C-alpha cells in the first residue's frame, strides 16, 4: 500500500496538456490509457495502464478511473471500427511485494531494488460493450450494443473515450440506450451495479438537465441499485 | 401439420380442479375471462369439439414493476433503453374449465372426463357453433342455424365478442314453463331486459299470452309494438297490448279467502277471527257469488246475535278496509278472458294502489287463473285454454321472504306446480335476498345482472342451483345491460350484453336536474306574494341628506 502512494502523487501532481478538442473529438488524439495484456473471456480484457516511461503522456488518474468508457480501434474488412468498452475493475501488481531476499542497500540509498520498480503496474479490467464505425472525419456512427464479434489483440492500444463519443455511442434513434447492460452486469460481477451507475451518472452529466432521457436513466439507475441492494441483503 | 392460424393458445397442463386446465397465450392473442375456447378430442373414435370457459388470466412474463418507478416514463422507454424487446414479451397463463362437447343425442354438453394433453392447440369457439350449443335449444347438430328456429328469444350477444357477433337465442318454452327470475340492482336494466323478453315473446313466431304485474307503470311503451313491422305476422298477426289501469282492477269480495281478509283487517282479535271465519265459510257455501259486506254482516248477526261485541267491531273493520276500498266489489271482477289471450300482453298498472291492494289483486287473480289452468288440464270447462306467463315487476313484493303477503302461498304453489298446468311466472327483483327462497329456487332460468349487495349475492348463491361460483364472481363487475343467463334455458351459463329494445324504454331515471330547473323557472314566472319593490315613483324615500 505504501508504494502505491508514489503513483498516487504522480497522478495527482503532473498536469499534462491533453490535446482534446471539445467540438469534434479526434479519435486519433485521444488519451492512450494502456495496452491489452491478456483476456479472461471474449468480452473481458486486461489492460496494463501506461506509465510515464511507456508513452509521452500517460493517462491521468481521472482519465482511467473506474467506469471510464474506452475504445480500441480495429480495422475490419477495410472499415475502421471502434470497439467500445468500459473500465470495470482495477488491480495493482507489485512483483516486489513479499520479496524477502537480501537487499543491496547502501548508506545513501536505503533500499536498492533495480528494475523491479518499473515492474510495478496497474491493471485495468475492460469489458466490451459494443462497436461503432469510425467515419472518415473521425466521428463514430452506427453504434451497436450487440456483442462485438472480433477478438482484440495483445498490445492493442486502449484509448480514453471522450464524452461526446460516449454520448453518441449510447444514442440509438435519439434515445439513450444501454442495451449491453445484462452482459456488463455478468462480466463485472460484484461491481456490476457500480459500473452501471457510474456510466449512467457520466451520461446524465453530459446530457442537458431537461433532456427526457434523464428520467429514464433515473429509473434504470434506481432499478440496478435496488437489485444490487437486494442481492447484497441490504433490503 | 394442421393449419394453426386460428390457434390462440397452447395447453400447458392440468389445473387445480379436475375439470380445469392451464394454457399459455402470447399478449397479441387477447383472450378475456369468460371467453369460450375449443379443442378437439377423440371420443369413441370420433373427433369432438370440446368447449371450455376461460376463468382466470395472469401474467407470467412481462416487464418488471421496477420499470414503472416514474409515472412520466413509460415502461417501454425504460425497456428500450436497456435493449429489452417490448414486442410480444408478455406471456399469459390462463385457466379454463372444461364444459364438455355437445352430445347430439342428449342435446346438451357431455364431459369427456379427459383433460387436453399438453401442447393441444386451442382456438376461439366459432360464433355459430356457440349460438347453437350454449342455449338449451335441443338442436340435433352443433351447426344448426338457430335464427330459423321458432319460439326462441334473441336476448343479446356474448359479452366477450363484438356486438351482435354471437347472438344468444334462448328457448321461450323453457323459461315460460319452468319460470324465470330477473335479478339485478336498480338501474342495471331489469325492466329493460324484461321488455326485451316480452318483445320476443310477442313476436309472430311465439304469440305468447302474457300478463305483466307492473307496480310502477314502467311498461307503458310496450304498446309501440303494435304497428311495428317486426311484430307483424304474414297471416295478419299483430300483438295486442292491453293496459289495465287501477280503476278497472276489481276484486269480487267472494273471491277473497279468509286468510286474505284477515290480512287486510287491522289486527283482529282471536274471537273476531273465529266469528269471521265461521261466517265467511257459510257465505262461501252459498250459491250466489255476488255478496257484499252487508250480507256478510247479516250472516254474522244471524249466527252470533246482533249485539255481539266482536261482530260490532268486525263490522267497523270490514267496512273500513273492504267496503270503502274501491278495489273490492260485491259483483265486479276482472274478467279473465279480457286479460289473457294468445298474442296479447296485458299490463296491469298498479302504480296508484297501495302495496296491500297490489298483493290482494295479485293473489286473487293468480288464484283464479291457476284454478282455470288446473281445470283446463283436467279437461274441465275453463276460461283459459292455453298456457300463460305472468311477469312480476318488484317480485319481492308478491313473494316476500318475510312471508307477510297473502300472495306468497299461491306464488309458491304456481312455482312448484305451475309447470304441469302451463302457468309460468317471471320474477323481477332488485332484492333477491327479500324474495321467498322457495319461490326463487323454483325459477329454472335466471338472468342475473349487476348485484353488489353481498346478502343479495348470497341469496342467488343459495337458491339458484345453476349459478356456479364463476358466474357469481362476475355479478359485481357487470355494467348496466350486461347479464349472466343461466339455468334451464341454457346448457351452460353465459355472459351476455342485452340487445337493444325495439320499442322505446319507459323506466329510466327521471331527468332530475332538468326538472328542478324547469320547476324553478316556473316558480319565477308566477307572481310572488311579497310586495313588489318600489322603483321610485313619487317621492323618494331613499337616503336623505343629513344637512
Image (cartoon, rainbow, N blue to C red):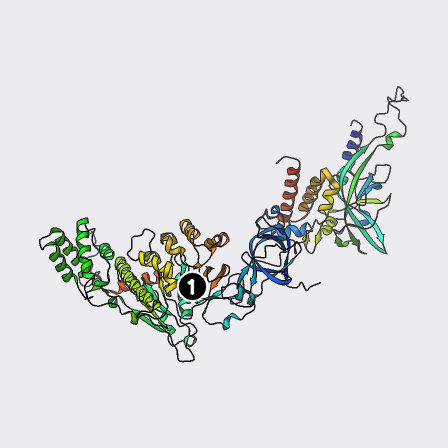
Label 1 element class: helix
Write the residue at 67% across / 49% down.
Answer: A207
Q: Residues within 10 Å of mark 1 (few under 14, many from 20)?
A: many
B346 versus A233 height, above or below: below
Q: Chain of mark 1?
A: B
Q: Is residue B346 left or right of residue A17?
A: left
Extreme residue in the top direction: A107
Q: Is residue B285 visible?
A: yes
Q: Position of residue A62 (x, y in %)?
A: 75, 39
Q: Position of residue B219 (x, y in %)?
A: 35, 66
Extreme residue in the front direction: B379
Count of numbered marks: 1
Q: Position of residue B43 (x, y in %)?
A: 62, 60
Question: Could you say which is closer to the camera, residue B289 or residue B219?
Answer: B289
Question: Could you say which is closer to the camera, residue B282 or residue B9?
Answer: B282
Q: Quadrant of residue A35?
A: top right
Extreme residue in the bottom direction: B235
B22 versus A228 height, above or below: below
Q: Is residue A33 visible?
A: no
Residue wearing tag 1: B175
A228 versus B2 height, above or below: above
Q: Is residue B249 left or right of residue B102?
A: left
Question: Could you say which is closer to the camera, residue B386 or residue A99?
Answer: B386
Q: Is residue A41 left or right of residue B207?
A: right
Q: Quadrant of residue B350?
A: bottom left
Quadrant into which the N terminus of chain B falls: bottom right
Q: Position of residue B247 (x, y in %)?
A: 24, 67
A183 versus B531 height, above or below: above
Amino acid at each position: 500500500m505504501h508504494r502505491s502512494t508514489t503513483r498516487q502523487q504522480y497522478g495527482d501532481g503532473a498536469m499534462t496538456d491533453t490535446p482534446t478538442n471539445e467540438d469534434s473529438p479526434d479519435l486519433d488524439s485521444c488519451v492512450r490509457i494502456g495496452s491489452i495484456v491478456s483476456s479472461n473471456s471474449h468480452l473481458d480484457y486486461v489492460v496494463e495502464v501506461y506509465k510515464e516511461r511507456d508513452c509521452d503522456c500517460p493517462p491521468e488518474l481521472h482519465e482511467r478511473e473506474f467506469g471510464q468508457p474506452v475504445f480500441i480501434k480495429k480495422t475490419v474488412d477495410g472499415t475502421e471500427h471502434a470497439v467500445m468498452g468500459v473500465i470495470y475493475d482495477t488491480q495493482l501488481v507489485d512483483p516486489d511485494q513479499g520479496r524477502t531476499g537480501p537487499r543491496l542497500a547502501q548508506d545513501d540509498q536505503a533500499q536498492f531494488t533495480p528494475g523491479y520498480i518499473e515492474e510495478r503496474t496497474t491493471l485495468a479490467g475492460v469489458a466490451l460493450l459494443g462497436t461503432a464505425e469510425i467515419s472518415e472525419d473521425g466521428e463514430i456512427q452506427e453504434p451497436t450494443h450487440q456483442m462485438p464479434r472480433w477478438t482484440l489483440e495483445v498490445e492493442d492500444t486502449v484509448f480514453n473515450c471522450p464524452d461526446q463519443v460516449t454520448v453518441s455511442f449510447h444514442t440509438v434513434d435519439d434515445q439513450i440506450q444501454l442495451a449491453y447492460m445484462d452482459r456488463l452486469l455478468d462480466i463485472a460481477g460484484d461491481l456490476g451495479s457500480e459500473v452501471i451507475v457510474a456510466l449512467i451518472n457520466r451520461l446524465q452529466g453530459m446530457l442537458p438537465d431537461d433532456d427526457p432521457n434523464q428520467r429514464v436513466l433515473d429509473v434504470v439507475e434506481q432499478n440496478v441499485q435496488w437489485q444490487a441492494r437486494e442481492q447484497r441483503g441490504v433490503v | 401439420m394442421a393449419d394453426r392460424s386460428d390457434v390462440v393458445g397452447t395447453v400447458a397442463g392440468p389445473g387445480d380442479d379436475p375439470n380445469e386446465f392451464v394454457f399459455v397465450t402470447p399478449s397479441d392473442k387477447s383472450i378475456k375471462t369468460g371467453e369460450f375456447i375449443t379443442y378437439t378430442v377423440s371420443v369413441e373414435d370420433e373427433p369432438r369439439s370440446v368447449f371450455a370457459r376461460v376463468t382466470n388470466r395472469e401474467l407470467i412474463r412481462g416487464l418488471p414493476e421496477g420499470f414503472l418507478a416514474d409515472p412520466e416514463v413509460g415502461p417501454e422507454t425504460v425497456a428500450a433503453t436497456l435493449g429489452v424487446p417490448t414486442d410480444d414479451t408478455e406471456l399469459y397463463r390462463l385457466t379454463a374449465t372444461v364444459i364438455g362437447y355437445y352430445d347430439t343425442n342428449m342435446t346438451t354438453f357431455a364431459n369427456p372426463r379427459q383433460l387436453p394433453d399438453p401442447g393441444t392447440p386451442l382456438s376461439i369457439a366459432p360464433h355459430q357453433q356457440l349460438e347453437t350449443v350454449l342455449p338449451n335449444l335441443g338442436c340435433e347438430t352443433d351447426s344448426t342455424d338457430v335464427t330459423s328456429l321458432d319460439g326462441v328469444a334473441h336476448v343479446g350477444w356474448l359479452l366477450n365478442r363484438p356486438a351482435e357477433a354471437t347472438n344468444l337465442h334462448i328457448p321461450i318454452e323453457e323459461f315460460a314453463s319452468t319460470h324465470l327470475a330477473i335479478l339485478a340492482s336498480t338501474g342495471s336494466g331489469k325492466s329493460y331486459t324484461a321488455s326485451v323478453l316480452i318483445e320476443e315473446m310477442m313476436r309472430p313466431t311465439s304469440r305468447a299470452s302474457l300478463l305483466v304485474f307492473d307496480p310502477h307503470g314502467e311498461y307503458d311503451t310496450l304498446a309501440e309494438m303494435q304497428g311495428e313491422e317486426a311484430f307483424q305476422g304474414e297471416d295478419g298477426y299483430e300483438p295486442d297490448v292491453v293496459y289495465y289501469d287501477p280503476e278497472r282492477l276489481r276484486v269480487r269480495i267472494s273471491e277473497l279467502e279468509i286468510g286474505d281478509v284477515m290480512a287486510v283487517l287491522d289486527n283482529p282479535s282471536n274471537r273476531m277471527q273465529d266469528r269471521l271465519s265461521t261466517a265467511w265459510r257459510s257465505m262461501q257455501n252459498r250459491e250466489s257469488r255476488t255478496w257484499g259486506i252487508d250480507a256478510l254482516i247479516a250472516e254474522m248477526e244471524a249466527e252470533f246475535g246482533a249485539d255481539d261485541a266482536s261482530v260490532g267491531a268486525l263490522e267497523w273493520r270490514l267496512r273500513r278496509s273492504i267496503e270503502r276500498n274501491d278495489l273490492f266489489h260485491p259483483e265486479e271482477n276482472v274478467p279473465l278472458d279480457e286479460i289473457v289471450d294468445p298474442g296479447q300482453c296485458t299490463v296491469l298498472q298498479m302504480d296508484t294502489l297501495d302495496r296491500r291492494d297490489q298483493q290482494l289483486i295479485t293473489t286473487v287473480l293468480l288464484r283464479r287463473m291457476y284454478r282455470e289452468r288446473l281445470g283446463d288440464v283436467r279437461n274441465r270447462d275453463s276460461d283459459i285454454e292455453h298456457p300463460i306467463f305472468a311477469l312480476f315487476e318488484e317480485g319481492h313484493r308478491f313473494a316476500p321472504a318475510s312471508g307477510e303477503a297473502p300472495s306468497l302461498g299461491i306464488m309458491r304453489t304456481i312455482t312448484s306446480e305451475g309447470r304441469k298446468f302451463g302457468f309460468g311466472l317471471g320474477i323481477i327483483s332488485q332484492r333477491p335476498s327479500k324474495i321467498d327462497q322457495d319461490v326463487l329456487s323454483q325459477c329454472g332460468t335466471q338472468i342475473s345482472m349487476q348485484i353488489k349487495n353481498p346478502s343479495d349475492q348470497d341469496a342467488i348463491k343459495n337458491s339458484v342451483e345453476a349459478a356456479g361460483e364463476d358466474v357469481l364472481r362476475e355479478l359485481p363487475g357487470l355494467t348496466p345491460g350486461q347479464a349472466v343467463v343461466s339455468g334451464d334455458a341454457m346448457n351452460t351459463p353465459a355472459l351476455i350484453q342485452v340487445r337493444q329494445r325495439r320499442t322505446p324504454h319507459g323506466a329510466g331515471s327521471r331527468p332530475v336536474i332538468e326538472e328542478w330547473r324547469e320547476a324553478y323557472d316556473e316558480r319565477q314566472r308566477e307572481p310572488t306574494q311579497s310586495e313588489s319593490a318600489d322603483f321610485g315613483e313619487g317621492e323618494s324615500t331613499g337616503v336623505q341628506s343629513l344637512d
